[in-house]
Amino acid sequence: MEDKEQKLENSVMGKINSGKIGLKSKYLFLAEKLGLGTAFALSVLLSVLLFNLILFYLKETDNLKYLSLGKFGIFAFLESFPYLLVIAFVILIGLSGYLITKSDVSYKKPFGYLAVGLVIFIMIFGGILTFTNLAHGIEKQARGGGPAGMFLMPLTNMRNSGVAGIVFERGDDYLILETPHGLRNVGIENVERVSLIEKGQFVIAVGSQDGHDFNVERIKVVDKKDVPAIGRGIEFKFSPFIEKDLNEENIKLLPSDLLYFDKQYRDCIKICFDSEVGPKDCFKECHK
Amino acid sequence: MEQLSDEQIVTDILKGDKDLYREIIKRYSEKLSRYLRKFLSDRDDIEDILQVVFIKAYKNLYGFNVNKKFSSWIYRIAHNEAINHLKRFRNGRISLDDIEYKLIDEKADIKKDADRMFLKKDVERVISNLDIKYRDPIVLFYFEDMSYEEISDVLRIPKNTVGTLILRGKNLIKQYLEDINKKHGR
């Protein structure tokens, strides 16, 4: 036994003294620790930011509001849901958890405790961030095409199952809505009690897209404060052309790409505007 | 030299006194060899792994935090090597020497009734068949005389889990031995 121990000792020391094996650089371990720490800090910070954006999106956009509009609302909710944001958040939480397990102290406490602690930390700080303008800045990037805006892209995407906006014009069987995508023609033949809807009101509606028109199945008046991001979207879209609120006079200044109607309808409206007929009559006329 | 702690020796090695590593090998070769025998049966395999453990430990000495226990750190390396080997090859029957047999018999209190006789080979077989997650803490606790804290550092599991695994492992050993007794009509 002693012989074997001596043999082992000589063999290992022989390799050390001959330089066959050497100490790994201390900077390697330092870099590993720093890299791990930095990656962990970054993943937690990004998780906090993404959680903040999820809260912001659910609170300020039309996404959650659709759920109050029955089964059609579910489609609109699913369509406007910020999948990329949620998936990136889940991946980052997973990454943070994985990096915790690689730390020197993680095993001292059961992983469940650490995971719950991490999630609570992210939720608290993500919640605190809602008091800052960070999410609004990213919203601006989303509208302006900035890279950080990609997580809020569903905010600017056109929905096929839902629409939200301000009533600009109300006909017997249609509404003209100011939306973040321009003026939209919304058919309300299938809806009852639309008489309650008035010009200037903020509405959300669910239904189906038919070409450039939208056929409403259910519609609801909401407070503008309930969907502030939609209000900002409308302002962003119209403000380059219209100084304040859209009205019967300044509507003629809108470029044709903001008239989100089919080509025939759009051309008709434009020609009608040029002929000095009021917009209400133009919409009525062209809607036929 | 004997008065120097492992951690002090490591500090001196890192300062440039490479030859001091001989003392580390002297202090741990028998202990680690005994530890590895609880996972591997082939003597040559144990010697090979032992050499790998000492080489890896030397190479990674800068990765050791001298404010922590060196023994836990080097046992961790040995543990990882043993597990890697077990993943690659079949697990053979472990062997206990007489002192170890006595240790597990007394400390783990597996022989409650005086008239129950367990043969050493029965105990060896039962420990060999014990799931690695129970075998590891039992070996470290009963044979390597480590505290829960040290076992926690070696196996990287919470201290409470160490206690739970030891208790469950001990109960499993007792259960298996009772089954063997019944089978043989002792």
Image (spheres, coloured by chain):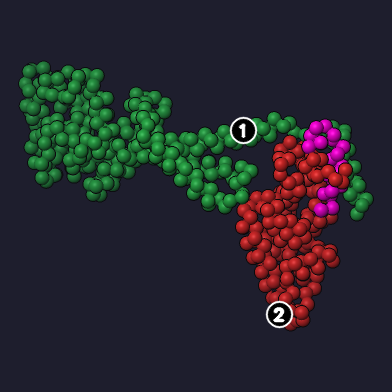
Chain colours: A green, B red
* Residue A193 lies in the magenta-colored region: no
Residue at the spot 29% in from the left edge and 37% down from the top edge? A61
Residue occupied by mark 2? B182
Residue at the extreme front of the image, as rendered? B3
Most common secondary structure along the magenta stretch: helix
Across and down, in percent, residue B29 comes to 84, 49
Q: Quadrant of the C terminus of chain A?
A: top left
Residue B145 in view of the camera = yes
> Disc 1 vs disc 2: which is toward the camera?
1
Between A203 and A104, the one lying in front of the other is A104
Q: Which residues are magenta?
A: B11-31
Front one among A216 and A249? A249
Callout 2 amino acid: Lys
Q: Position of residue A263 (x, y in %)?
A: 19, 26
Is B21 in the magenta?
yes
In the image, what residue occupies the spot 34% across and 37% down?
A57
Q: Chain of mark 2?
A: B
Label 2, residues with CA under 10 Å away: few <14, some 14-19, many ≥20: few
Q: Residue at x 30, y 37 (%)?
A: A60
Left-right relation of A238 to B135 = left
Q: Name which quarter of the figure residue A206 lies in.
A: top left
Q: Which residue is mark 1?
A: A34
